[in-house]
Image (tube, rainbow, N blue to C red):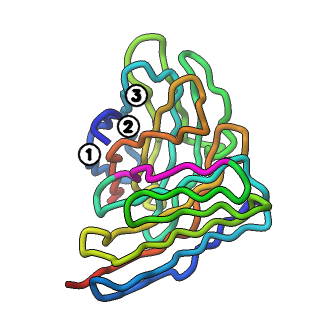
Amino acid sequence: TQLLEQSPQFLSIQEGENLTVYCNSSSVFSSLQWYRQEPGEGPVLLVTVVTGGEVKKLKRLTFQFGDARKDSSLHITAAQPGDTGLYLCAGNTGFQKLVFGTGTRLLVSP
Amino acid sequence: NAGVMQNPRHLVRRRGQEARLRCSPMKGHSHVYWYRQLPEEGLKFMVYLQKENIIDESGMPKERFSAEFPKEGPSILRIQQVVRGDSAAYFCASSPKGQEGNGYTFGSGTRLTVV
């Protein structure tokens, strides 16, 4: 069974702080996606990383895919209250199905 | 999320009743995926369908659950004789021609409560 472990599970920070969320697995994935989910809604795709070592930036968010394509990280610079939500990584097994991580619940206070 | 339409948003069923969850994919998307999110857990893959075909149902419970994606109309996830443990949020996602690298578009989900 492929598992994706995310850490930390919960993170409560003040506006303006930086943070990093980690997504780790012992399995190799063909690609990895990051989603953000708000209460009562479905996950919204933030980014897809495909190549080992790839780094993608989306405004204040920086995503990195590990060289071996087993792990990933999400770094947020100068967090804002609007960044509050559940962050999910999801690995693509190559068979059209995603394995989702355990999730990181982020709360950014003003 | 607006592109993938799921209904109903909330569904309450008594134990033993049937639940039907509908999903209309984004325009032009021919691949549909169903995921289940139990309280305080991550999303778990259930089934992957193309029009009139079930491609992968490895995540579906062996009994009481079925899914279809007919030539015309929405995809349907059907749960017969629901039990309390079926209470969860069920999400549908779609993609065009299995473009896994581009990620999926998820609907807002159907929250099923079994009483």
Residue drawn at x 57%, y 54% as measured from the top left: B44
State the residue position of label 1.
B9
Identify residue type, mark 1: Arg
Classify B77 as above or below A63: above
Q: In the rendered structure, the residue with mark 1 lies on which chain?
A: B
Q: Which stretch did the figure color magenta? A: A42-50
* Residue B96 among magenta residues: no
Locate residue B18 relative to residue A6 in the image: left or right: left
| Marks 1 and 2, how far apart at CA | 9 Å
Locate residue B3 relative to residue A93 in the image: left or right: left
State the residue position of label 3.
B25
- Element under label 1? loop
Residue drawn at x 54%, y 56% as measured from the top left: A56
Identify residue type, mark 3: Pro
Specify which label sits upstream in the sequence, 3 or 1: 1
Q: Position of residue B105 (x, y in %)?
A: 43, 40
Specify which label sits upstream in the sequence, 1 or 2: 1
Query: In front: A54, or B64?
Result: A54
Callouts 3 and 2 on one subunit: yes
